[in-house]
Image (spheres, helix red, strand yellow):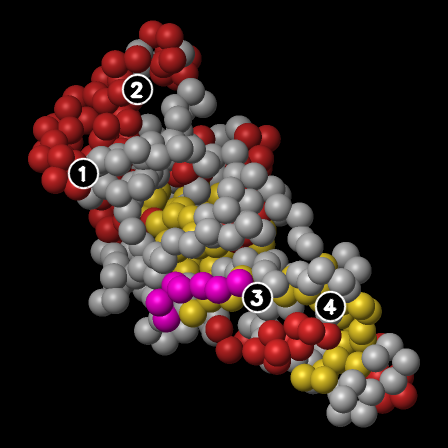
Amino acid sequence: MAKQVKNPNYKGKKKISLQNIKKYLYVAAVVFIVAYYLLGNLPDQQAEQGETGNTQFQSVLTDTVSAGEGIELEYELAGSSQANMTDKGGNATDRSDWLVSVKSYKDVMPQGFSLESIPEYNGAKYVPVNGNVPYFTENEKKLARQGYFEYYGDLDSYGRCTVAFDCLGRETMPPSNQKRGDISSIHPTGWKQARYDCVDSETVMTRAHLAGYILSAENANEKNLVTGTRYMNSDSMLEFENEVRYYIYDNSGKHVLYRVTPIYKGSELMPRGILMEARSVEDSGFGLQYCVYVYNVQPGIEFDYSTGRSQYTGIFFDTDSDTVITDDISLSSYGLDKATNTIHSPFCSKFAEVSAENRTGFAGDTEMQSQWAKMGYTLCSECLK
Ligand SMILES: [Zn+2]
């Protein structure tokens, strides 16, 4: 069974009513303008001491961030303030211009990617795509060289998240003392919670940030939260988020162009997987570059991606030993032909003819055969009648 890592960002939840949020949104936004202006004009050192000296600012920021729909507003304001505040090579006017262009940025899907080219999940939690090189266009790379930004695509006609496209740096990250806010008010498409003993913390569905909180300081932004399995969110995605995070920590003042795209099949509500692209900006991808598709799966569970409903299968993959393991009381060892998903006795002469690359193990109890069949495995007609 695959290792599971606890998500250190996972916090308990409390409910906030949407009405209350909306009610205070306007007030919070106005307060934010003032707070941002003041905080933004503090010297860096002082801003970092926020936990002791500026508790008031912290609570103002948190309020605004958890206001959900205020996020869009926040970045518009942040953008125009920054334009006057910091000059990173271009002049202030240029910087305002490109922030406006990010707002109207239409072409958000990576051109060239297709779900059809992705192999079926077979135990590996992700696969490199496009030779591990992101699909960023020259214009997108050029945009990133002008400074940090955050863009969250509008929900599509099914109400689904579309894309998070960010140029990340220390500026976009939350202050080290700021805890992630409450996100339980958001119910992404395909949200059907279920509990299983085989899942860490039992609940299988999580609200997966496209751009992780630790990178973007985004909380309850409905454009940035999708229905993701705990395995994908806390294990697969976290690994790639951490690469960005450590790059930024290790390379002061540098940035990472980052795009996270949920990949849906047709009109399904739960993404099949997530395309994650990252490229370090100032060293043109030398320090960090990847392009991977992570599977939105949970070992032992299968999903109806059109609704988000799930059920226990008891079938796990152990990638270390390259063995399919079923959750049965008594296990027997079989041989599996990966190409045809046919289960053999290890001594079957037909299994001996299977090429080495397609030959793998299968451990289970023959009493579970009907379950195996549901998962698409068939028994060899000669050795396992
Ligand atoms: Zn056989």
Q: Secondary structure at mark 1?
A: loop
N-terminal label among 1 and 2: 1
Q: Nearer the viewer, mark 2 or mark 4?
A: 4
Mark 2–mark 3 distance (CA, rounded to whole Å): 45 Å
**Horizontal side of residue 111 vs 322, given as left or right:** left
Callout 2 amino acid: Gln
Identify the residue shown where x is 33% and y is 73%: 267
Magenta stretch in the rendered image: 306-312
Q: Nearer the viewer, residue 359 or 53?
A: 359
N-terminal label among 4 and 1: 1
Q: Nearer the viewer, mark 3 or mark 1?
A: 3
N-terminal label among 3 and 4: 3
Identify the residue shown where x is 77% and y is 64%: 331
In the picture as drawn, the residue positioned furthest to the bottom comes out as: 382
N-terminal label among 2 and 4: 2
Callout 1 amino acid: Ser
Q: Which residue is mark 4?
A: 364
Q: Secondary structure at mark 3?
A: loop
Callout 3 amino acid: Thr
Q: Position of residue 68 (x, y in %)?
A: 23, 41
| On screen, residue 346 above or below 19 | below
Residue 17, numbered circle: 1
Q: Secondary structure at mark 2?
A: helix
